[in-house]
Image: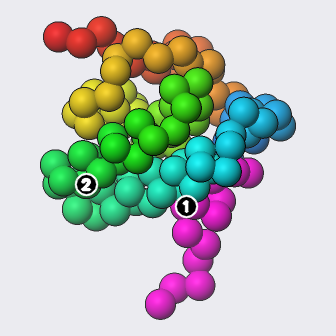
Amino acid sequence: MSSAKQPCQTLPRWLKDNLGQSCLAPLTSQDSAALAAAVQLVALYSFRPHPDVLDAFAKTVRSMQPSCWHLAYHSIAHVLNWEDRARLWLNAGLPPSIRLSRCKFEPSARLDAVPAAV
């Protein structure tokens, strides 16, 4: 087994670097556990892009306070690519209208906002 750290271990630092040092302040213990599980599910999805993994991701995100969902949205880019956030989020059946802040290291000046549901 690789000695590389798992995404759930590196995510807190990545989020703080991208969204600010206090971005994790609203998380409860349950939210923290769900966020860690959600990013691990994104990692699993990167190897096995199956609808069941997306369903598990959506259920995990929904176990968090809605005010923290944006952290799960941005965590997608920690494992995949910036442009994968909206696609994976919508394919998981999560609501298209969540409040998003711009990540510091996004590649363009335009926010990769979740498009309106079709």
Q: Is residue 70 visible?
A: no
Q: Is residue 56 left or right of residue 50?
A: right
Picture coordinates of residue 77 (x, y %)? 49, 42
Of 50 and 55, the residue lying toward us = 55
Q: Is residue 24 left or right of residue 31?
A: right
Q: Which residue is rendered at x = 45% and y = 51% of the image?
A: 38
Of 74 and 72, the residue lying toward us = 72
Of 43 and 36, the residue lying toward us = 36
The residue singled out by tag 2 in the image is 53
23 lies above or below 38: above
What kind of residue is marked 1? Pro
46 lies above or below 80: below
The residue singled out by tag 1 in the image is 7
Magenta-colored stretch includes residue 7: yes
108 lies above or below 18: above
Residue range of the region highlighted in magenta in the rendering: 1-13
Write down the quadrant of residue 46 in the picture. Answer: bottom left
Mark 1 vs 2: CB contact within 8 A: no
Picture coordinates of residue 21 (x, y %)? 83, 37
Q: Is residue 52 visible?
A: yes
